Amino acid sequence: MKKRISATVLLFMGCYCTVSLLVKGQPPPANAIDLTIVGARIYPSPTQKAIDNGVVLIRNGRITAVGQRGHVKIPPHSRVLDCTGLTLMSGFWNSHVHFIEPKWENSSTIPASTLSHQLQEMLTKYGFSTVFDTGSSWLETTAIRRRIESGEINGPRIFTVGEILSARGGLTPDFIRRIGFLPNIVIEIGTLEEGAERARQQIKKGVDGIKIYAATTVEDLVEMPPGVVEAIVREAHQGGKLAFAHPYNAHGLEASINGGVDVLVHTIPNAGKLSQDQIARMKRSRISLIPTLKLWKVEAGRENMSADKAETFVKAGVDQLREYSQAGGQIIFGTDVGYIDYDPTEEYVFMERAGMNFQQILESLTTAPAKRFGLSNRAGRIARGMDADLVVLIRDPAMDVRAFSSVRYTLRAGKIIYQSN
């Protein structure tokens, strides 16, 4: 769910891997304790040189060795995933997702096969082994997470902010229900004291971050007072949590920057060109930016904008990403999936259009979110001791960024959680 621009809502070939058992020639179970990936071109991290004809050893969900074939000894009886001609990277993060579609309702009782399929179609099909939910029902999202962590279903690691804190009248539950999303995803607040108390309640529930609508518009523009934003952020930080904000317009951007927000979950086409002062303050505050550029094309279509107006609107977001990226600001990949459709391919194209190269896009998918969310000691790179969260691509995105979506396998903790046909 997102806000509206005007009258409607602006819310929210290749070779194939084959699996073989060295000794008996039988495929390993999906949850094999030992797994060896061989033959792929490995990108250990965005800054490291690729390893051709590489080998990755995995045991108990962790990487135990990585190197070129012939330099890494394959353990006897290890299960082998032959990925000759394919590309191997650390598992991708999508740091802006929503579990708000009606199909996620009653997630605790959805049949396991159905729920696994839904997660595949939305996330693991595109290589996402970790996601950050930036607004949904705490009850439903944590039910999904529990079922994944128990091993009952296949799915990504999920972090969540739970419900979003919004100024009163910004996005009412009734309005959200009318546009087709689950209703209990926004908490309306009025005063500074109420905002702080709601933030404390969210933290007590166990959320992984706090999300704020700094500004929104349904029938009328509703802007959260800067002091309320600041109070919520202060509570988030005191509780050891990051503060996320949907800025929407120039007011929301300034309230977010001045209020100490950690992550902007969108670029802000409505705010126009970022000033050098804004960029400098964002960098000084170590604010991470999630571009969601494809969203602006989707919203332009929903608003029935003319071709010229739509291009201007989308370009504003692209330009903002270019400016902040070139200034050295941290960029984290996210698509607003769940509010818009699932395929992230166009997002990669827009990011390239904004001047980001292959390494920078890969960083936004791996090392940047791992660092931002405190997991760089175990996620985001292919190295000894790291979690075996991996993605195997049919094509090399260093040649064409669209190939980031050409997923053959997604693994989490060494377990195959998605396999293309």
Image (cartoon, helix red, strand yellow):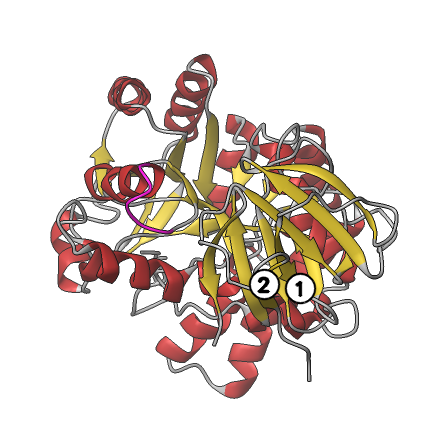
- Going 52% across and 87% down the picture, which residue do you hit? 307
User: What's the residue at 31%, 57% (across, down)?
Assistant: 116
For disc 1, the marked residue is: 82
1 vs 240, left or right, is left
Amino acid on which disc 2 is placed: Ser
Residue 183 on the magenta segment: no
Cα distance, mark 2 to mark 1?
Answer: 7 Å
Badge 1 local density, few (<14 within 10 Å), some, or many (20+)? some
Element type where label 2 sits in the image? strand
Q: Is 126 situated left or right of 224 in this image?
A: right
Query: What is the total number of numbered labels drawn onto the structure image?
Result: 2
Residue 378: image tag: none
Report whether residue 94 is seen.
Answer: no
Q: Secondary structure at mark 1?
A: strand
Q: Which residue is mark 2?
A: 20
Image spot of residue 251 (x, y percent): 48, 43
Q: Establish if 9 lies above or below 225.
A: below
Among the 4 quarters of the image, the one containing residue 257: top right
Report if residue 102 is visible in the image.
yes
Residue 419 in picture, x, y percent from top left: 48, 66
What's drawn in magenta, residue-wise? 150-154
Residue placed at 11% from the left, 53% from the top? 174
Quarter where residue 191 is shown: top left
Which one is closest to the eye, mark 2 or mark 1?
2
Q: Is residue 292 left or right of residue 153?
A: right
Vertical order, 14 against 169 (above or below): below
